[in-house]
Image (cartoon, grey):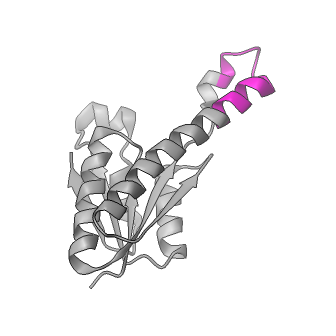
């Protein structure tokens, strides 16, 4: 039924539940997985707090380096979990991108036939303030989405 599953993670405990479900599903049906983590661009609000709207290059470079290192740790651990389960896994980091848009674009480009991700299950004001990447992916995706409630 599914041959290639895109599993998203940000390294959080909640995302780990989605990762475990995706790996278990892939293992049970013999599917390959791509494990994706997306790091957003430098926060505009933080940049605006600096001297006017100027952010020193060293600050941006430090942010980018920290994001790369974090993504590498997240993906190494996730790929190891997949290998331990006997699942063929590819790890992918996309920096400076919007998570929902990137998830949808990469799933399509990679020919994935399922997206697996966790959702915090926030409601009301918290959801409005913090947003919901899972909701955006579910409502915009032409590919089936498995949402694991964390």
Comparing 68 with 133, the one in front is 68
**Which quadrant of the figure contains the N terminus?**
bottom left
- Determine the residue positioned at 28% across, 72% down: 26
Q: Quadrant of residue 29?
A: bottom left
Residue 112 drawn above or below residue 11:
below
In the rendering, at what x and y percent does residue 128 appear? 34, 37
Q: Judge left or right: residue 58 versus residue 111.
A: right
Comparing 40 with 86, the one in front is 86
Comparing 26 with 56, the one in front is 26
**Which quadrant of the figure contains the C terminus?**
top left
In the rendering, at what x and y percent does residue 129 appear? 37, 32
Q: Is residue 136 visible?
A: no
- Determine the residue positioned at 28% across, 31% down: 125
- Determine the residue positioned at 37% across, 61% down: 7
Residue 38 drawn above or below residue 127:
below
Q: Which residues are magenta?
A: 47-64
User: What count of labels does the image hold?
Assistant: 0
Q: Quadrant of residue 53?
A: top right
Q: Judge left or right: residue 64 versus residue 15.
A: right
Residue 117 drawn above or below residue 28:
above
Q: Is residue 124 visible?
A: yes
- Determine the residue positioned at 29% across, 32% down: 126
Q: Judge left or right: residue 122 versus residue 87.
A: left
Q: Is residue 43 magenta?
A: no
């Amino acid at each position: 039924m599914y041959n290639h599953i895109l599993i998203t993670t940000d390294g959080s405990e909640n995302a780990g539940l989605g990762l475990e479900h995706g790996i278990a599903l892939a293992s049970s049906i013999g599917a390959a997985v791509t494990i994706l983590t997306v790091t957003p661009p430098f926060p505009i609000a933080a940049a605006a707090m600096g001297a006017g709207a100027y952010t020193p290059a060293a600050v941006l470079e430090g942010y980018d380096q920290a994001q790369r290192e974090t993504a590498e740790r997240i993906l190494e651990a996730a790929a190891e979990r997949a290998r331990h389960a006997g699942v063929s896994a590819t790890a992918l980091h996309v920096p400076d991108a919007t998570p929902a848009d990137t998830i949808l674009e990469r799933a399509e480009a990679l020919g994935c036939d399922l997206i697996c991700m966790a959702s915090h299950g926030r409601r009301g004001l918290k959801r409005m303030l913090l947003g919901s990447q899972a909701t955006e992916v579910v409502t915009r995706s032409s590919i089936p989405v498995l949402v694991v409630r964390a």
